Image (cartoon, helix red, strand yellow):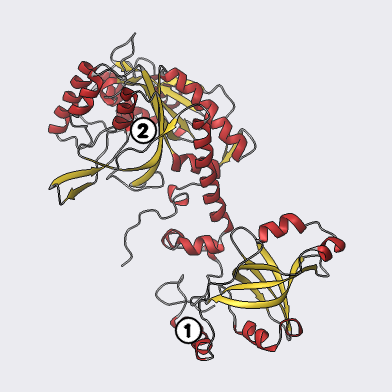
Amino acid sequence: MAESDSNPNEPSIEQVEVRKQKLAKLKAAGAALYPNDFKPTHTASAIAGRYATAGDEDLAAAPRDIRIAGRIVALRRMGKASFFHIQDRRERLQVYIQQDGVGKETYDLFRTLDTGDIVGVSGHLFRTRTKELTLEAQSLRLLTKCLRPLPEKWHGLSDVEARYRQRYLDLMVNAEARRVFETRSRIVALLRRFFEARDFLEVETPMMQSIPGGAAARPFVTHHNTLDMELYLRVAPELFLKRLLVGGFERVFELNRNFRNEGISVRHNPEFTMLEFYQAYATFDDLMALTEELFTALAREVAGSLQLAYGEHTIDLAAPWRRLSIAEAIVAYGGAAADEVATLDGLRGFASKREIHLDAKLSYGSALVEVFEAAAEAQLIQPTFITGYPIEVSPLARKNDRNPAMVDRFELYIGGRELANAFSELNDPADQRERFLAQMAARESGDETANPIDEDYVRALEYGMPPAAGEGIGIDRLVMLFTNSPSIRDVILFPLLRPQR
């Protein structure tokens, strides 16, 4: 196939023109160019499921007018008889067409078809000499002309961004891409079933908020003209979901989008999907057990095993999972001594040896988290709950009873990346106001990710929120794990990319 000089993934102008001329000839002949009256009776996957191992007698007893529609993905033309493969939503099926069977007019139409064209075929099933299940065409109609030739070697593109920019082509010719997104849809459905079975109520909370909150992140800002007010695309639904706990919905979950005006990488997309759930009268320890139960249930349903291949590793999801504090993880995986992680000076000394930059203004707690992320996080391959988070990086979490400088919080790491964040919820309104004030001070000092004061949320807490625990799980990263995908762009249908110039 000739390729465009400007873009190796684009067909040449000449190739497109040839196909447009074919369409023009059909129009001149009075053909219906884009009909919408063909009704398939079967799918390729249904045919394969029913007749894959059928003998001659079963095929003879099959319907004589099987109707299937889809895209031509392979053509093998011969004289007055030919073969082609048609691809529908999940499978492909071979079709045999001969002039004596469909008539000269229809066969002449077939001879003008190209790979990529969408057709409707009716006929009966048989097996070829090589035993391939095949539909012998009795009629054929062109339903949609493909004006741009399909890429011949999509799997080996040097410009991998082309797969993301033209996802429709990726899905069209790449069975693995379709499998990833079918798996994603299945995972989301399983998540809903899991929580509904445990008496959680699915809810929806605002995507546009007058005050950004619920996570330390820079928001996207927009403007409402009628109200003449700034609004923020939500960075997290947390504060609204906890308002529902106050209102008496004791178990709630939401599956929806969050937006954070931050970097783009193989792990981050500014628009991403989160599951957040909250349970009254539960602690973060309870959610560790629930998280193990959730992930193992997903693994059995999606993978049929608790062992998952992920890159060069085999992830073992069998519970119980390892639990370490942040300080313990830095010692175990970062090579620090216990006394080095016990003080700010010790952390700074260790960071200097490891060439980890720490801002001079960082507190002990903030420095502890930064050293952990730089020295230990990527090595947490097997499922690990990390606990012992400092209060200054956890403004919405409950203080630990034994050590009020820390909070009752965990993050779950698998495959070297964070998949979940959970904590026992702070429900003391006075403590929450103090935390918000500390965040405001950080904001005034230049921290654009710090939360502003949400007075209505504090007011809600003053009506009384039951003791509770809550968790957020990144759906995109979860799908990456279960589909062995190295980049978040592989599991988002239309990831954000720079415009092409």
Marks 2 and 1 sit apart, C-alpha to C-alpha, by 56 Å
Relative placement, left or right, of 442 versus 495 is left
**Residue 187 sits above or below residue 431 on the image:** below
Q: Nearer the viewer, residue 164 or 265?
A: 164
Q: Nearer the viewer, residue 267 or 340?
A: 267
The C terminus - image quarter: bottom left
Res. 160 mark: none
Residue 349 can be seen in this image: no
Vertically, is 81 above or below 433? below
Q: Is residue 319 above or below residue 399?
A: below
Residue at 50% of width from left, 61% of height from top?
Answer: 170
Who is closer to the viewer here, 436 or 364?
A: 436
**Front tag of 2 and 1:** 1
Disc 1 is placed on an element classified as helix
Name the amino acid, label 2: Ala
- Residue 305 in percent (x, y) is at 64, 35
Are dots 2 and 1 in contact, CB under 8 Å?
Answer: no
- Who's the residue at 28% across and 15% down the image? 405
Q: Read off the residue under disc 2.
A: 374
106 sits left or right of 453 in the view: right
Residue found 65% across the figure and 61% down from its top:
43
Q: Is residue 56 visible?
A: yes
Compared to residue 230, the image places residue 294 above or below, namely above
Q: Secondary structure at mark 2?
A: helix
Categorize mark 2 by other alpha carbons within 10 Å: few (<14), some (14-19), many (20+): some
Place residue 447 in its image quadrant: top left
Type of amino acid at the residue the image marks with label 1:
Lys
Q: What residue sits right under mark 1 in the picture? A: 20
